[in-house]
Amino acid sequence: MKLLREKIQDEGIVLSDGVLKVDSFLNHQIDPELMKEIGLEFARLFKEEGITKIVTIESSGISPAVMAGLELGVKVIFARKRKSLTLTDNLLVSSVYSFTKQEENTIAVSSQFLNKSDRVLIIDDFLANGEAAKGLIDIVKKSGASIQGIGIVIEKSFQKGASELKNSGYRVESLARIQSLNEGKVCFVEELEE
Ligand code: G4P
Ligand code: NA
Ligand code: NA
């Protein structure tokens, strides 16, 4: 997605050890116009899949997921990372290991919003090692629903998440794919189709 790659080049900041900071439009401040375009692109990519629900994870997955849900006309569920006062019954849970924080976290979704007839699109902001995506896959599987695809805003193709998910048979569509972040520069995987 050209608009997104330009935004990353213009506003992304390469931090040490392969981390890209995109606080100006995705992870802290959110650019609604860009999110709208991201939602349109996910909807275009997955419109033939008969999606009935989108599942994401708080917090930064929510804005792209909501815009995709608006375009596809489906509800959006976000997995919670923290215990909720009101979300206590019938939880589907999974454990997610964060490499960046070196800690194991429990994520949870209420079973009332997912059932076995659902056809789910999983959306997240970043795909690095794929731990968050695997946790979401685990939760969707526990509900009995099927997973029709995984939509990612920014994929760090040099980490193992994307290839592992594809090797497991999932359709992964990433709107920007980063080959490397070496020497402070963002280098994208060649986008032949655009
Ligand atoms: P993984 O799920 O793919 O294995 O990722 P990892 O554990 O390494 O990442 C943990 C958190 O860091 C996730 O957000 C993930 O989206 C984010 N992340 C990973 N690599 C990058 C990067 O290069 N840049 C940025 N900006 N984020 C990255 P989170 O902690 O769950 O935060 P949030 O969703 O509440 O924002
Ligand atoms: Na994040
Ligand atoms: Na995320």
Image (spheres, rainbow, N blue to C red):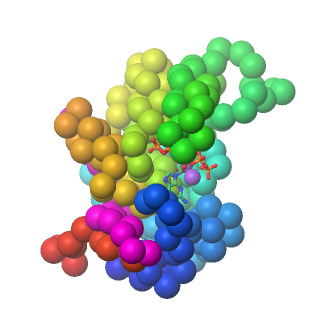
Task: From the top left corner, tell me how far across and down residue 147 is, in percent.
Answer: 35, 34
Please tell me whether residue 10 belongs to the stretch shown in magenta. Answer: no
Q: Residue at x 37, y 57 (%)?
A: 155
Locate residue 93: give its quadrant.
top right
Q: How many marks?
A: 0
Q: Is residue 177 visible?
A: yes
Residue 133 sits in which quadrant?
Answer: top left
Residue 175 to residue 166: above or below: below
At 52% from the left edge and 75% from the top edge, which residue is drawn?
Answer: 12
Q: Position of residue 131 (x, y in %)?
A: 44, 36
Point 58% across, 27% down: residue: 104
Question: For the view shown, which residue lies furthest in the left direction?
Answer: 192
Above/below status of 106 relative to 157: above
Q: Which residues are magenta?
A: 169-184
Side of 63 relative to 14 (left or right):
right
Q: Is residue 116 visible?
A: no
Percent position of residue 179, x then y:
29, 64
